[in-house]
Amino acid sequence: MERDRLYPVRMAGCAFVALAFGGLVCWITYLIIGLLIKSVIALVIVVMALLAVIIRRFWGAEDLAAHEAGHAVALHCLGDYKIRSVKVKKLEGVIYFDRPSCPTVEEITDFEYEVKICLAGQEAVRVIHGRREVAVGGRDDRFDARRFVRRMMTQSGGRFSWLRSRKLMRELRRETFEFLQREKERLTALSTILRDQHGLNGVSVHEILGRE
């Protein structure tokens, strides 16, 4: 029987074609799986964003009104602050006020009041609605509160401690919550008016809160 001299060459060619085809299939499968994973991730992100918009659409306005009302009550009751105006529009709330006794932040010495004023927005939502706020406006307040706690700990030459700062923050947050609970009637009234009217001038705010 005559031996086929080209048999090894044909077999090598078939093996090469098979490997090339297998590699192509693996590459295409990798691309498809990668696209599917990316599509799923993108879909999850879109769904979460839509849920966030829906949640903030239905609950955000109430939370913003309660948030700004909390700041206003704290400013009215805790120190020598003059509220100029409070605005609650769509998904944004802001309060303008003056510090007659210390015009600039650098001149502040009573940091405890400042921390409580920063925390009053979030705690007001807990007092009025019994839950954490769904609006995201509290992030700047938390940052400012931590900054004031740091200055509060170091103003007399003491050293900053992360554990001590967390403990102090918890204590001030608890005191702020208890203070707003005592002022819940005025807090709720102001929150309702802010939600319905989307803003008030400072004179009206102080009149609602009963400045003597």
Image (cartoon, helix red, strand yellow):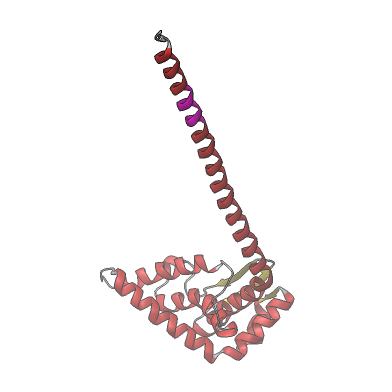
Q: Residue at x 60, y 71 (%)?
A: 95
Q: Is residue 133 above or below residue 23?
A: below
Q: Which residues are magenta?
A: 17-24
Q: In the rendering, at what x and y percent does residue 37 appear?
A: 54, 48
Towards the viewer: 25 or 73: 25
Q: Residue at x 40, y 70 (%)?
A: 148
**Which corner quadrant of the image does residue 132 belong to?**
bottom right
**Which corner quadrant of the image does residue 87 belong to?**
bottom right
| 95 on left or right of 105 | right
Q: Residue at x 66, y 86 (%)?
A: 189
Q: Is residue 181 above or below residue 143?
A: below
**Which corner quadrant of the image does residue 65 belong to?**
bottom right
Q: In the rendering, at what x and y percent does residue 23 appear?
A: 47, 30
> Chief secondary structure of the magenta span?
helix
Q: Quadrant of the C terminus?
A: bottom right
Q: Is residue 210 visible?
A: no
Towards the viewer: 125 or 50: 50
Q: In the rendering, at what x and y percent does residue 21 appear?
A: 51, 28
Q: Is residue 61 above or below residue 211?
A: above
